[in-house]
Image (cartoon, rainbow, N blue to C red):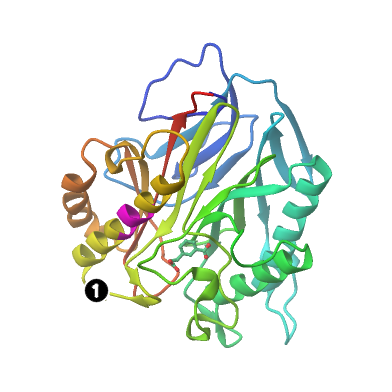
Amino acid sequence: MSLQFVSSLSAVSRETSGEFGGALLGEPASGALPPWPVQRIFAPLLGATTAALHETWLTTLPMQSGRDEAIAWQRTDGVLYGVLELSEADFPATPACSSLQAASAEAYRRIFRLLDAQGMPHLWRVWNYLADINLEMQGLERYRQFNIGRQDAFLEYRRGAAGNVPAACAIGLSGGALNIAFMAGMTPAVPVENPRQISAYNYPADYGPRSPTFSRAALVYPAGQEILFISGTASIVGHQTVHPGDVVGQCQESMANIATVVDEANRQCRSSAFALNELVYRVYVRHAGDFPKVRATLKPLIGEAEVVYVQADICRHDLLLEIEAFASHVLEN
Ligand code: 3EB
């Protein structure tokens, strides 16, 4: 197995592995940051015993690291992880293009240039965080501005904006720069869609002038391994939000969507079938007060699975939570 995930919640021996990249969730840490690429996600943890939590990918393979295009990256022969922060203040708004749209397009252009330079063509999974995601500025909600910039860069770099697109999440924080982490590989991801939902890249224009550029899930293949990345998943059926104002209903609907995506992935996967109780979950809850209800609703659905709860904003004002997950299997040959 070439990549192994560890969090502060689980104790795994690091004796033979090196740190590849990861995330630091929670309150700003006072100590020094580790030398590997780390995405800092400044959002309150809910129900946690510590104020901050490290999630780290480890590998036993040789690594190379660098900093290009303001992206801190590290790679093996087959996989690259990078982290990029761009301050919107560095992208003056014009009447035709908001700061966030310009920063989003530039961020993805930089990612694609780095991947081209590294000969690492396939974007597998992207973690997007931006301030004030539901705020309307220059007449358009900021999430929709982000979607324009992101799609522009995919098209400009000839990636296509439908079908073969990475798994992703796009989450709102209370402040900070546009903050993007990504994992890319030498082999293509197998995108997975959800038959209960319209593909996000085909959403109608009601949700913004450009569609979001992500797949519902992706199966990816680091050496000797199959990872299922499930994108941020919310209470959406077709293209519509369902159970507005009902956090328990939204939680159940999100898990019904994840169960369906897992079933779809299992039709295409090369290892044994993935199960809901083996996934590692990250749950974003808009209102901290909803956390006990969300935890109680999830408990019977996911058993003893590892879950981290974070207070954050979701990309539609009527969504009260979003759930993402992943799991990793060893490939026999
Ligand atoms: C949705 O299904 C909910 O814009 O990258 C989930 C995952 C969502 C990723 C993104 C947005 C994104 O439309 C929102």
Does label 1 point to a residue whose CB lies under 8 Å from ligand 1?
Answer: no
Instruction: Name the one closer to the observer, 141 or 210.
Output: 210
- Using the rendered view, name the quadrant where residue 140 is placed: bottom right
Question: Where is residue 266 drawn, in percent x and y?
Answer: 39, 45
Q: For mark 1, does the 10 Å Cα neighbourhood hold few (<14), some (14 to 19), or many (20 or more) residues?
A: some
Instruction: Name the one closer to the observer, 23 or 182.
Output: 182
Check disc 1 and report the residue beneath it: 243
Residue at image position (52%, 56%) is 168
**Disc 1 residue type (three-letter):** His
Q: Is residue 315 left or right of residue 310?
A: right
Q: Is residue 162 visible?
A: yes
Q: Which residues are magenta?
A: 257-261
Q: Is residue 18 above or below residue 286?
A: above
- Residue placed farthest to the top in the image? 15
Q: Is residue 286 left or right of residue 102?
A: left
Residue at image position (38%, 21%) is 11
Residue 198 magenta-highlighted: no
Q: Is residue 259 left or right of residue 75?
A: left
Q: In which quadrant will I find the C terminus?
A: top right
- Using the rendered view, name the quadrant where residue 146 is placed: bottom right
